[in-house]
Amino acid sequence: MRTYELWVRDGSVKFDGRPDARRTAPSNKLSEAERQEIISIANSEKYGSLPPSQIVPSLADEGHYIVSESTFNRVLHEDKLLNNRG
């Protein structure tokens, strides 16, 4: 009943405003500088031939945590860098 009340006003169906809704960026969204740092590390000579599953733990062993392995993987996937970089 509540859904009907939300979608129907004065006997006619309201316009769907969801596609036009303004959505703010998440507060934890990576900045462009952080994305570039991930890409430069992945393309460096030391890590160029390694997958994210080996890069992230190696960086953590050195005391340098940037992002999680899944985020590292997602950034490389978006920039089409998951293939052989080495």
Image (cartoon, rainbow, N blue to C red):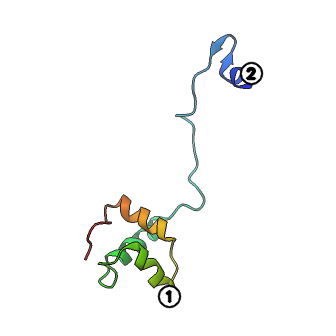
Q: Is residue 37 left or right of residue 30?
A: left
Q: Residues within 10 Å of mark 2 (few under 14, many from 20)?
A: few
Residue bearing the label numbered 2? 1
List the single residue furthest toward the bottom: 62
Residue bearing the label numbered 1? 61
Residue under the point 67% across and 10% down:
11
Residue under the point 32% across and 66% down:
82
Q: Quadrant of the N terminus?
A: top right
Instruction: State the image coordinates of residue 48 (x, y, percent, origin top left).
Output: 30, 78
Instruction: State the image coordinates of residue 69 (x, y, percent, origin top left).
Output: 48, 70
List the single residue furthest toward the front: 53
Q: Is residue 17 left or right of residue 73?
A: right
Looking at the picture, does residue 67 appear above or below residue 29?
below
When asked about the image quadrant of residue 39, the answer is: bottom left
Residue under the point 52% across and 79% down:
65
Instruction: State the image coordinates of residue 5 (x, y, percent, origin top left).
Output: 72, 21
